Amino acid sequence: MKHSLFFFVLFCFFLAGCSVLKIHPPLKDEFAMQRIPSCRYPEFSDDMLCDGLENGILQSISYLKRLPCSRQFKFGKDSFNAAHMIKSMEHFLNFIQTRPSKDEFNKFIKANYVVYKSIGGRNGNVLFTGYYEPVLQGSFEQNTEYKFPVYARPCDLTTVDLSLFVPHLNNKRIIGRYTGRAVVPYFERDEIECKGALKGKAEKIAWIKDQVDLFFLQIQGSGKIYFDNGKTINVHYDITNGHPYRSIGKLLIEEGIIEKSEMSMQKIRAYLREHPEEVKTILNFNPSYVFFKIEEDGPLGCIGVKLTPGRSIALDRRIFPLSALVFIEAEKPLINDDGKIHNWITFSRFVLNHDTGGAIRGPGRADLFWGNGPYAEIAAGHMQHKGELYFLVLDFDKRR
């Protein structure tokens, strides 16, 4: 098997034009954000109650305490170890428990914390989108009503750590399936959903009613499924089939079906509901497929902590420090009694870097977790707004 894997890795380099196997070097983390002088600090204010922030910070601390104290976290060109990150979090937590005024907040941060700003995308801004926790009705058995399976990780899916063969490919891996003589790309979405490629290869965690619901469950990465017997399970992202994510929203814009200014998850759902004959073609445009596992609690972020609604954010884990304290400036929707958005307003708040996502790449992308329920679904489905992203860490000179 080792020889097959080795030749497969070499073969990858001859397939540089193949999007499944192409390796894109990430932006170096020292360039993803820049330390800014205190005169350029934003005005720190928070639109939410402190309870959620306290919980989010405690989740970050629980993650950090599982790590060696010497583990390094990069903030631009600077580096801080896990022990210092814990001190930074605890110092901030102790302060917010005094319920300070906005002026006290800003004085405290200027006196104690250094701030780093994300360089953003090409225009210098960060594009904020949102995600939420779907709650779906399911069945443990397939029947005429519940026809679409939620799959666990297949037994023939394997991962290859490329750094074992080419040392400079650190943290690079490919996902495929072992055929007995070689590793080949794993089945694409349409092979899984339309051609029975997983028959006998993957456990079915549950069955749900709607194929589009299953698709968006995969996009969100986690959710709850409840059953007629009163039981509820938390399903959480385990692994993908290794194929690149392709946005069906972008497809519908390029095809002239939905205007870019009107694009939202709700618009996509409405179009698919009105054109059931196109559902398979549109969904299969995205070859990526997510496999799930059951967790006792959820939803969980990539660092293994429970996400805090409104306080957990997903960023590119390759370039931004996991668990870090972040300050964001973006826009959120105001909802009418009939569940319609009537306005977007600017907001700012402190969040924690608890998660990541397949489509969240580079310093110009951020995905805010809204929780579950009607508002969360509306906000997550429509949020596509530019804003600012800052990271805070206790100044070395203020260590205690």
Image (cartoon, rainbow, N blue to C red):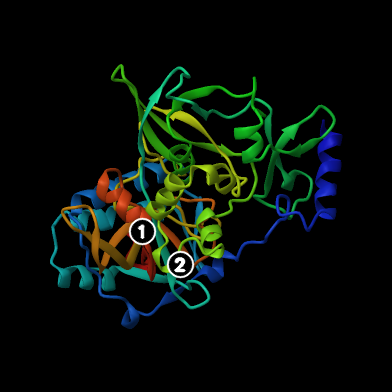
Q: Is residue 79 shown above or below 208?
A: below
Q: Residue drawn at (69%, 27%), measured in percent from left and top?
A: 156
Q: Residue drawn at (58%, 51%), measured in percent from left and top?
A: 245
**Label drawn at residue 260:** 2
Number of residue marks: 2
Q: Position of residue 4 (x, y in %)?
A: 85, 35
- Left or right, 104 with respect to 324, comes to left
- Disc number lying in front (1 or 2): 2
* Residue corresponding to mark 1: 382
Q: Secondary structure at mark 1?
A: helix
Q: In the displayed image of the protein, which residue is found farthest to the bottom?
A: 39
Rendered image quadrant of residue 45:
bottom left
Q: Secondary structure at mark 2?
A: helix
> Which residue is more in the foreground, 195 or 166?
195
The N terminus lies in quadrant: top right
C-alpha separation, residue under disc 1 versus residue under disc 2: 12 Å
Q: Amino acid at mark 1?
A: His
- Left or right, 202 with respect to 305, comes to right
Q: Is residue 166 visible?
A: yes
- Mark 2, residues whose alpha carbon is within 10 Å: few (<14), some, or many (≥20)? few
The C terminus lies in quadrant: bottom left
> Which residue is more in the foreground, 196 or 6?
196
- Left or right, 230 with respect to 20, comes to left
Rendered image quadrant of residue 307:
top left
Q: Position of residue 314 (x, y in %)?
A: 43, 53
Q: Position of residue 201 (x, y in %)?
A: 64, 23
Q: Is residue 146 shown above or below 132?
A: above
Q: Position of residue 354 (x, y in %)?
A: 41, 49
Q: Earlier in the sequence, mark 1 or mark 2?
A: 2
